[in-house]
Amino acid sequence: MKKGSNRRKFLFSASLGAAMTGCRQGEKPAAEDEGPNRLGKPVSEYGDRSPHEKSKRLKPETKTPEAASTRTPLQDSYGILTPAALHFERHHSGVPAIDPARHQLLLHGLVDRPLVFGMDELKRLPSVSRIHFVECSGNGRSEWSAKGAPDAQRSQGLASCSEWTGVPLSLLLAEAGVQSSAKWLLAEGGDASKMSRSIPLQKANEDILVAYGQNGEALRPEQGYPLRLVVPGWEGNINVKWLRRIKVVDEPVMTKDETSKYTDLMADGKARIFTFVVDAKSLITYPSGGQKLAAKGFHEISGLAWSGRGKIERVEVSTDGGKSWVNARLEEPRHRMAFTRFRLPWTWDGSETVLVSRCTDESGYVQPDRAQLIEARGMNSDYHNNATKPWQVMADGSVKNA
């Protein structure tokens, strides 16, 4: 037997032995109470994640915690679904405590038969489950600044994706009998701020859900328990939480929540209003700001892309700051108005470089870079930023905002 073969056999045996004893070479064995010879934790009524997993929502500093938000740690995510416990939050007056046994949904206005639904009555109706993202219109706000956000969570953490279960709103409207003069809806939440938005009737008849389930269980209180709207592909505040009332009307109501904010002031002084649809966006989550590559060699670039116009059809990745682009692999199945996971194999040579992604949706819309977005809208806006996000890889493997 050749000398090299003996050496490979020895290394294989050593690594196998280390794996079987539960430690790497040079490490001490785990304490007895952590090993396989001790009885483990008994079954529980509700599962917990491992204490070794530290990923959490980012809670920003604020003087009014009831009117605040938290951000999803997208950089730690796998696949496309966001655990309900890590779904971002945005509230205008805190999270109300609602008893589902007493909660009701009123459907009235320009209808033949005004209706009131209890939760039990809603759950008796035909239901559907669909995967959709929800994104706050203020997501990416920091990217209007040339400085930008230092990591994925601070940059784009006001977006999450879940499987939602509920009743199609079109079914409820058909039961109530919508009158011919109706063109819009007013949806109102049961929180102290009475968060409310006007929604075109056409969208309601297409794909809006009155949802009571998220990722296989009841909605979390922070996500609208016991009832919320899910408006696929449209800005987050329209997905009204703690839903208590839907009024069918003939024109937009122009509520405080759709006139005092969620509009874009353009360079010519005009304001964009009712900018419902979320424009296509992508984000590299690995490697991204705050992370560090362990060594030169193979790495898999991975990230998320989404669009309010439908499916993501293409994601391109540049590993040289936008000089050249390569198509990433899109994981299937791809859902409309949902996160799509993209991946690209990459061999890092140890030199400093810039990584960036851009996506194209099924309508043909291509995600712009920051300069293109500013050229189209100016610098007065505070919402709806979908520009590409570059990350700079340093020679020591650390990654920062570019």
Image: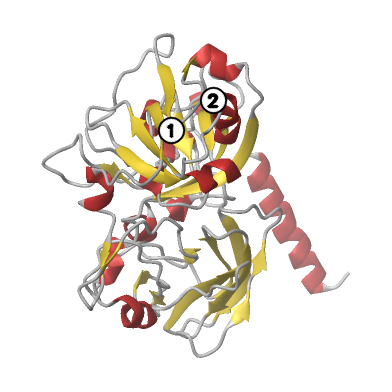
Q: Nearer the viewer, residue 178 or 292?
A: 178
Disc 2 versus disc 1: distance between alpha carbons? 49 Å
Quadrant in the rendering for residue 152: bottom left
Callout 1 environment at 10 Å: few (<14), some (14 to 19), or many (20+)?
few
Say what amino acid the circle numbered 2 marks: Ala
Q: Secondary structure at mark 1?
A: loop
Q: Percent x, y for residue 115?
A: 48, 19
Q: Percent x, y for residue 221?
A: 38, 26
State left or right for residue 219 relative to residue 258.
right
Q: Quadrant of the N terminus?
A: bottom right
Say what amino acid the circle numbered 1 marks: Pro
Give the residue at mark 1: 51
Give the residue at mark 2: 176
Q: Percent x, y for residue 331?
A: 67, 58
Q: Residue at 34% across / 17% down in the picture? A: 98
Q: Are marks 2 and 1 in contact (CB under 8 Å)?
A: no
Q: Quadrant of the C terminus?
A: bottom left
